[in-house]
Every structure is written in C-alpha cells, then in structure tokens.
Amino acid sequence: MNTKIYINGIGSISAQEANLLALKNPNLYDTSILRHCFKDFRKYIRPKEMRRMSEAVKMGVAAANASLEDANVQKISGILVGTGMGCKQDSDAFLEDMLQNQEAFLAPTKFIQSTHNTVSGQIALQLDCKAYNTTYVQSSVSFESALLDAEMELQTKNPKNLLVGGVDEISDYSIDLQRLDGQIKEENFNNLQLLQHISPGSIIGEGASFFVLSNFRQGNSYAQYFGNKMYNQLQEDELEPALRNFLQEKEITLKDIDAIILGQNAMLVDQPYFSVFSREGLKDIPQLYYKHLVGEFYTASAYAFWLACHILKEGEIPQTCKLNSIKIAQKPKYILLYNVYRGKNHSFSLLRAC
Amino acid sequence: MKTRVAITGMGIISAIGNTVAENFAALRNSKSGLTHLEFLETKHAKDYLFGEIKQSNAGLEQKLQLSKNNNFTRGALLAGVAAKEALRNANLETLPNDLAFVNATSVGGMDYTEKFYQNFSDKQNTQKYIEAQHPGFTTDVIGAHLGCKNLVTTISTACSSSANAILTGAKLIENNKAKQVLVGGTDCLSKFTINGFKSLMILSKNACKAFDKNRDGLNLGEAAAYLVLEDEETAKERNQPILGYCSGFANANDAYHQTASSASGEGNYLAIKKALQKANLNARQIDYILAHGTATVNNDVSEGKALQRIFENNNLPPISSTKAFTGHTLGAAGAVEAVFAILALQKQVVFKNLNFETPMPEIPIKPVTAFQSNKNEHVLSNSFGFGGNCTSLIFSKA
C-alpha cells in the first residue's frame, strides 16, 4: 500500500447509541436478539421513500449519509458495501409468498429489492452518484472485502473520497432457521454477561457502519487505515504466525500494537481461535470486545472498525469493552482487529492514529 | 508501469456445453441451448424457454466425486465443474497456496433454500443447507473443495456480479495483492428467480430476440464460468501459454432506478467510456462487442443508446448478444461472456446473434447474422444489473 488512507467520516447504527459516552451506560438486552435502536431515519430519508425500504436499506442509507455529513463531503468517487445476507427481509418475504401461493399472484416489489446490492444501489440513487458501485457478500469478511477494494481504488494521486460500509438486518422469517442451525443461544441472559455463556450459538444483532475513506488527511480525520488480510481457512495453530506475518508486511511488530479488538462471540466453535490471544506474547496486549453490545452478525466487524476510529481519535476506552485488565497506552497508536465466524472467514484489520 | 493482466485458464458449463470446447462447438454451429425445463421443479417448467444444463445434481456430484453427505447446492456443483476446468487449463491443478478466489453469484444456494425452507425443522439431513441462504456459503463450499485457503470473497451485484469479480481480480493483480486469481461466477435456475422475473413481466415464452423490434423479454439460464487471471510475468516465468489479456475494466452506476435502465443508458455509457480509458484505446479500436443484450424492451434500447454515443455516427463494429444460446445466466453472465470473448479473440471469429429479424426503430442496430471470421484485437463485453450496476470489460488478443 503506497497511498496513505484516512478515515474522514463515520456513521453507525446498531443496538447501541453511536458515541463512546453512551457506552458508559450501554443499552441492555435480556434476549438473544439485539435489534438496532436508531430512531431518526427521517433526518436522512423522505417518508415517501422510506415506506418501501427494508431495514437494511434504511440503516445503510442513514449511516452512509451520517458519515458523509461527518466528513463534510458531498461528492464521492465510489460506494462499496459489504453485507453477509443482503436484503434478507425482502428476500424472505418474496420466498414465503412464492411458496405459500404456489408460484402465483406475485408482486415484483419484494423481488426487486431482494438483490444483495440493493443498499449500494439505493445509496447511489439517493446521492445521484454514478461512480464505482459494488457489493461484497462473503460471510464475516464482507466488510473487509469492501475495505480491500477501497484500498485499491484509492491508489491514485487525485484526491478521492469513497463511501465504505457494512450492513446486515435481522429478518423475523429466518430467526427460527438460524435457531435451528444452532447460530443463536437458547438461554436468555443479560447481554453484558455474554462471556459467561459459552455455548454453540451467539446473540445476534443487526446494524450498519459506514465510513468515508479518503487518500488525504483532513483536520477532523479519525485515523489512518493501514490495511487488512483475510483467510478463508486457518487452523488454530496457524493463527498466530498469520498475525505475525501480517504485521511484518506492515513493518511493525506485536510490541507496536496498543490494543486488539476481538470479535469474541461466545460461540463454542470459535473459542480455540480466541483463546490464542490468551497465550504468552499476546496476553499482555490490551484486548477489547464488542459483540456483547451489538450482537453477532456478518458485518459486526464494521462496528469494531467504528469503535477503533473513536478510540484512536478520542483516546477513551469504554470500560464495558475491556476483555483483560492490561492498561492501554495514553495515546494509542495502533489498533488491530481480529474476527472469525464459525471457524471460517478470518480477518485482521489495522488502524493507526493520525 | 503496471503489470498486464493475463488470462491463463478458462472453464465453463452452460446450457450449450459442459466444457469450453463444447460451448465453442455450439457457438460455431449457431445452436441454441434453450428448452423447456426437465430438472427444476416449477409450475412454469413448460411455460417458458430456459437455458437449463441437462444434468441432475446427483450426476454432477458424481462428476466431482463428492461424498454422500456433501453440502453442495447446484450453484456450487456447476462452479466446481467449471472452476476445475479453468485451473486444469492454467496448469494449476496443484493449487498455489496464495491463489486468490473472487467468486460471484446472485442466486447462491436459493435453490435448496426454496426446496427445504418449509420443512427444515422435520428433516434433519437438510439442515446443513440452512446457511446456504447467504451467497458466501456457496463460495466457501467451492473454495474448500478446490483448496483455497487465503483470500476468498464474493461479489453480488445482480446481473453484473461476475463481470465485477473479473474487475476485482484484475485490480488484485495490478496492485500486486495476488499473482494468480480465480475469478468468475455461478448461478443455477431457481423458482425464486423464475417467479421474480415473471412478476416483472420480462420473461419471454419464445427464444429471445436481442436488438429486434419484436423482442419480448429474456430467457433465464444457468451456468458457471471461471477464468484464471495471472500477472503476466508470473505466467511467462512458468512458460504458461497466455490466452488473452484483460486490458480494460470499469464500473459505473446508472443512478436512475432499482431495476430499469435510464433511457439514455448513462451508466452503460460511463462504464464503456471508462473501460476504454483504462485500456488506453479509442472506440474505433474495438473489433467486436459482446453485448449485454438481454432482449428486454428496456435494456436493448438503453444499451444501444450508450453504444451509439460511444461509437459515433452509428459506426458500430460487429455486435452480438449470446443470451439466446445460454439464456441470461444472471450473476454468471459476465464470466460466461468473458469466455466467449476470449474464444472470439483466439479463433478470430464472431458469433451469430440468434433470432434477429427486424431492427429496433429507436436505434437500428444490425447484429451479426452468421458465425463468421473477423479480425479481432480487442473485444468489449458489457454486463448490466439491478441497482443500476453497469460493468464493461475489454479483452485483448494474446
């Protein structure tokens, strides 16, 4: 990576309010399904448009607009979206209608909006943006794939702003299927107690986190994006070498890392990977987590990216995110993100203070 | 100076053949693959013509030597066949550890989701397909089968999905993120898409007539097609024959409507223009156009308008849509037509635009009327999808 990439604006919708201060008293949930708590869609979307929009589209459009507003940017050169499931609600609705009505009397609206690139397309439509537009749908590395593409798109001398985000919605239709598949915890408990409930499933969530990534620094830049690395498959003993290789490529070492934000989801199958971070050499690095706050979903790691941006800019660490008691440097410089879902689609992402 | 993106392998399975050679034979003989359905169970099996691959899932499982308890959906099965042909063609059967895989799909595992959705709970042996509802699952299954362990990702931008996978793969090579990338896409027929396009009233009961005045919609098809993109130097170092180059690629958004194209074809125009700029070519240097040409009333006029603007004074090189051979294979279409573009470059030919009779009154495009030889240095391939997504690729002779 030759060109320096900066995060110049952020917008996030999740089960938590989008500021660090609010995380001092986080929203609490006693269920394994954490819906987003955003109420202010009217600020970004006209009521007439909103009626037809599914939750994913609403969240995506609102978070995208919030990040543009934050960066004070009007013109963008690309929209890159990651989404594990795409527009699941509309997709499920069309599917159920089709099955129940035995392939008759179907209206096209839900089908039209079921395609996975509906969010990126709707953002383009709303912003009248004819530039580059793409959507990645690779499970827990969907957002990271969009980041990798953005990094390549920003390799130019001309100043350029891209909108990059991750979005996924909960669909009532398929909650039961996810339960059947063992993805959701059977017991109810307070979400802050997540780590005391290691079992097959997790608590599930939804949200959208969008970022303005630019190849130039602004006065209000949050952080520098330092690149990522994805592995479709890793054995647990390959994780630490892979991490060291990644840092070596970035010409830093573990000693430089001020904090690691883990995608700890309390799922049994992923514990061997997360426990690697309790080993010698890694356990003395301050570690944070976030899925107890927003739930597990394919693009939950975009929330971790949002968290890292805030921490690097403001230097504050939300107490509720601390996974170990190691003290974090006064002015953290490097934050590393690690995520995995069901033993596959691993990713490391690196951010650096401006 | 950026490296050139070489193509060193390709593989395809579609309604007109199970291999690249079989597909070329059908193109040469101007033989369409459109029929009524024999394998997919739907009320509409005999109502419309489709590009169905005449092989059962069990037959495909056998071909890939899968165990009984495999979790392959049809899209993954088709992908397995085509991807293996591409890797074999590139002499990469022993998979390089750092080979990247950029897949594309719009249907994903929807065929199994719609089959089992209502009774997942009583049939435990179907529960392994619950996750098939998200497209990354299809890619994970194929990736694991092939042995891809590092960068594996999926693009889903409706009907331009695999054109965008090729675009991303080319960028990975140009940016030195990978030396070899398997790119392409897969989509099987499903009740979901058949009923979706039916509800939009753009399915034709007849074999589609791209660019014809009397065109009345598209035929759906299923296919998987893959290319091996490779850094030119890497290919030369291992003495691997180069089949062609991916010299231009661009994506733009129409920003007009979720499903319809703007009357002026603005997004199409921008994508073609940017692809030409990327390839450092002017429009006159394009020898052949493989159009998106779905034969919907809307697409062919918009695409025609865009082409008219690019190729001034209607000075169009030979142009064909191959959709009446394979059907519109949605997320796979861009990769299918990339394979056809490479064949056009290798064999120095152009393919017949089947079923064309009368030019459209709005834009009198006259597509290729017979399989014939043509001097091809550069071929343009267009793919446009829902969400205003427009992608154009330019392939050049090796």
Image (cartoon, grey):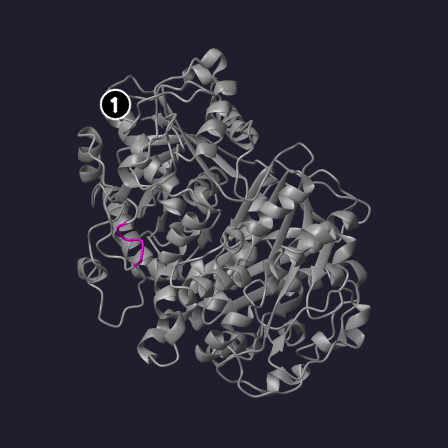
Q: Which residues are magenta?
A: B42-46
Is A182 on the left or on the right of B45, as rendered? right
| Mark 1 Cα-neighbour bin, 10 Å: few <14, some 14–19, many ≥20 | some
Q: Chain of mark 1?
A: B
The answer to whether residue B27 is above or below residue A194 is: above
The answer to whether residue B67 is above or below residue B93 is: below
Q: Give how far across and how far down residue B382 sits, in percent.
A: 43, 32
Whether residue A224 is visible here, answered yes or no, is: no
Q: Give how far across and how far down residue B297 sits, in percent.
A: 44, 33
Q: Give how far across and how far down residue B101 sits, in percent.
A: 39, 51
Frontmost residue, B396 versus B14: B14
Give the structural element (helix, strand or loop) at label 1: strand
Whether residue B133 is visible here, answered yes or no, is: yes
Q: Quadrant of the N terminus of chain A?
A: top right
Say whether residue A209 is magenta: no
The answer to whether residue A40 is above or below residue B350 is: below
Of helix, strand and loop, which mostly describes the magenta segment? loop
Residue position marked by numbered label 1 in the rendering: B349
Q: Quadrant of residue B332?
A: top left
Frontmost residue, B6 versus A96: A96
